[in-house]
Image (cartoon, rainbow, N blue to C red):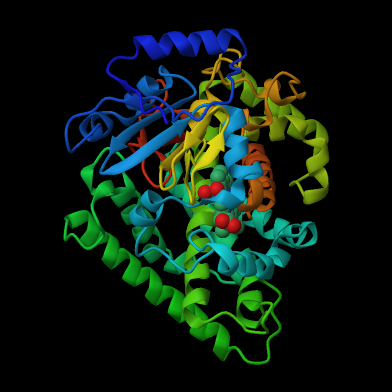
């Protein structure tokens, strides 16, 4: 196997350009991807922590695949859609979630669907799938619209709001009502604290992302406290449901409590609690960020906001419903373009369980494979003027663009189980709110971003509300 050490990018950048010119086709070899030279012991850790975005830019200049070492993990990053497809779809049975991902999320819902593997994961996914059918999503649509109407009513004309916080409250209410039939308005604090602590600990520009969770750093302590409070809330909610004898429920929580796996067993207490934590987190934080970035983009691009409102005026008679979605093409394009420019789940981690061939390369067992969604979403090979907000680019399929140049919800068997829920929620809440309010920018330009557990704005996203 070739284990090339590359001290500077030039040589590899040359081969990168050659590959680009030839459509990046390379012969199959048993070579491992080129490796970035690093310092003894620490490898490329400090360069990464100093500026993770600049580090990814540098990696990209080496070609479609490059290896390096950060935080004691042996990494490989892919920038090529075909390799992404091979990992997530074609060869998905040869990969598990990477150790770096499990370590950085240690203590977070370890028995929940995001973290489990093998048969346990498969059984859980089958058990929960009925909560995400088209019929079920349809039954959640009313709550999506109702909470968005309420959010719009609560804004004062002219006030400056933290859009991120307002959208987080909205999406948490929707999620909790739809999947668990719970009103969380008064009990949001533990979810908010745990989400902040998880993001803080996962922040790639700090060493704590690479320290074990038992090291008593302030971030780890806040994370432990946050998770303990989150778990107490979930225990309370579970106890309330169990005490509500006689009432009929038809939601994700009733599936968790009652449905049986292939061996006739229901989920154990730990699994139920971890699923609730998983869904309360994964199901609201991502959609909240997607809405926040969408308001930012519409604020920066008033002509697109105008076009969106023109569509809503033309197609809707009052608030939208699920049945209006097929007529709201531009609304859908706006959501897709926002997820391209600011994908909340910005990187996917995998690890091969044996040496695996991907494209021309052999990826050694145990390599921490990172797939930076945001880099593929911003790649000039597949997107004209990738920095520009142009929802129209989603009006028609581009036959030249590979499928895995765009994958905000992942792909293959472990793609986002909440994808349909999220797309419905994003379109309905965007339409409902855009009929009633407008968010004006208070600051110039794009927000600084942080690579935390999700791709977050570094500072609160403040915007001025104008009621329409
Ligand atoms: C804009 C919104 C969302 C985005 C961008 C997003 C993105 C993703 C991505 C990329 C994955 C795959 C991760 C991987 O392969 O390692 C994923 C998995 C997952 N998502 Fe989402 N998601 C969103 C909304 C939701 C919602 C609304 C829910 C729940 C209602 C949800 C629940 C989950 C769960 C449980 C998994 C793990 C699935 C499994 O491993 O089988 N997500 N999500």
Q: Residue at position x 29%, y 36% from top?
A: 69
Give the left or right position of residue 143, taking residue 193 as reference: right
Q: Is residue 116 visible?
A: yes
Q: Nearer the viewer, residue 140 or 397?
A: 397
Q: Position of residue 205 (x, y in %)?
A: 27, 37
The answer to whether residue 88 is above or below residue 233 is above
The answer to whether residue 119 is above or below residue 86 is below
Q: Position of residue 303 (x, y in %)?
A: 62, 18
The outermost residue toward the front is: 1
Count of numbered circles on the image? 0
The image quarter containing residue 197 is: bottom left
The answer to whether residue 270 is above or below residue 19 is below
Q: Nearer the viewer, residue 163 or 209?
A: 209
Check the picture and name the quadrant holding the C terminus: top right
Q: Position of residue 396 (x, y in %)?
A: 77, 23
The image quarter containing residue 327 is: top right
Q: Is residue 342 visible?
A: no
Q: Nearer the viewer, residue 228 or 23?
A: 23
Check the picture and name the quadrant holding the N terminus: top left
Q: Nearer the viewer, residue 236 or 451?
A: 451
Give the left or right position of residue 265, taking residue 43 as reference: right
Q: Residue at position x 24%, y 35% from top?
A: 45
Q: Position of residue 298 (x, y in %)?
A: 56, 27
């Amino acid at each position: 196997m070739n284990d090339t050490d590359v001290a500077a990018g030039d040589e590899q950048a040359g081969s990168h350009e050659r590959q680009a010119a030839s459509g990046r086709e390379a012969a199959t070899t048993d070579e491992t991807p080129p490796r970035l030279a690093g310092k003894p012991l620490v490898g490329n850790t400090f360069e990464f922590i100093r500026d993770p975005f600049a580090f990814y830019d540098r990696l990209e200049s080496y070609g479609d695949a490059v290896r390096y070492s950060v935080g004691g993990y042996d990494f490989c990053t892919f920038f090529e859609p075909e390799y992404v497809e091979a990992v997530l779809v074609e060869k998905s049975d040869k990969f598990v979630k990477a150790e770096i991902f499990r370590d950085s999320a240690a203590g977070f819902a370890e028995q929940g669907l995001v973290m489990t593997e093998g048969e346990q994961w498969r059984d859980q996914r089958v058990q929960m799938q009925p909560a995400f059918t088209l019929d079920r999503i349809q039954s959640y649509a009313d709550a999506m619209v109702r909470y968005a109407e309420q959010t719009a009513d609560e804004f004062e004309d002219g006030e400056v709001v933290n859009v991120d916080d307002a959208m987080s409250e909205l999406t948490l209410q929707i999620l909790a009502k739809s999947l668990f039939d719970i009103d969380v308005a008064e009990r949001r604090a533990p979810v908010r604290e745990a989400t902040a602590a998880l993001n803080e600990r996962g922040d790639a520009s700090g060493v704590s992302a690479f320290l074990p969770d038992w090291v008593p750093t302030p971030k780890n302590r806040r994370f432990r406290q946050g998770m303990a409070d989150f778990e107490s809330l979930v225990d309370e909610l579970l106890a309330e449901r169990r005490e509500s004898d006689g009432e009929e429920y038809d939601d994700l929580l009733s599936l968790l409590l009652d449905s049986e796996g292939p061996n006739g067993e229901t989920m154990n207490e730990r699994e139920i609690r971890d699923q609730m934590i998983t869904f309360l987190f994964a199901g609201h934080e991502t959609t909240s960020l997607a809405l926040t970035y969408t308001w930012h983009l519409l604020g920066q691009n008033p002509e697109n906001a105008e076009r969106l409102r023109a569509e809503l005026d033309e197609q809707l008679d009052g608030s939208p419903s699920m049945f209006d979605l097929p007529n709201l093409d531009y609304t859908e394009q706006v959501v897709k373009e926002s997820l391209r420019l600011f994908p909340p789940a910005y990187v996917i981690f995998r690890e091969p369980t044996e040496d695996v061939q991907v494209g021309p390369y052999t990826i050694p067992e145990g390599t921490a494979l990172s797939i930076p969604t945001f880099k593929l979403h911003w790649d000039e090979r597949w997107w004209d003027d990738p920095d520009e907000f142009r929802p129209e680019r989603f009006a028609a399929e581009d036959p030249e663009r590979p499928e895995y140049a765009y994958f905000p919800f992942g792909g293959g068997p472990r793609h986002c189980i909440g994808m349909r829920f999220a797309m419905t929620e994003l379109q309905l809440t965007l339409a409902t709110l855009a009929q009633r309010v407008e968010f004006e920018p208070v600051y110039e330009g794009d927000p600084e971003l942080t690579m935390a557990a999700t791709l977050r704005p570094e500072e609160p996203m403040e915007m001025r509300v104008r009621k329409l």
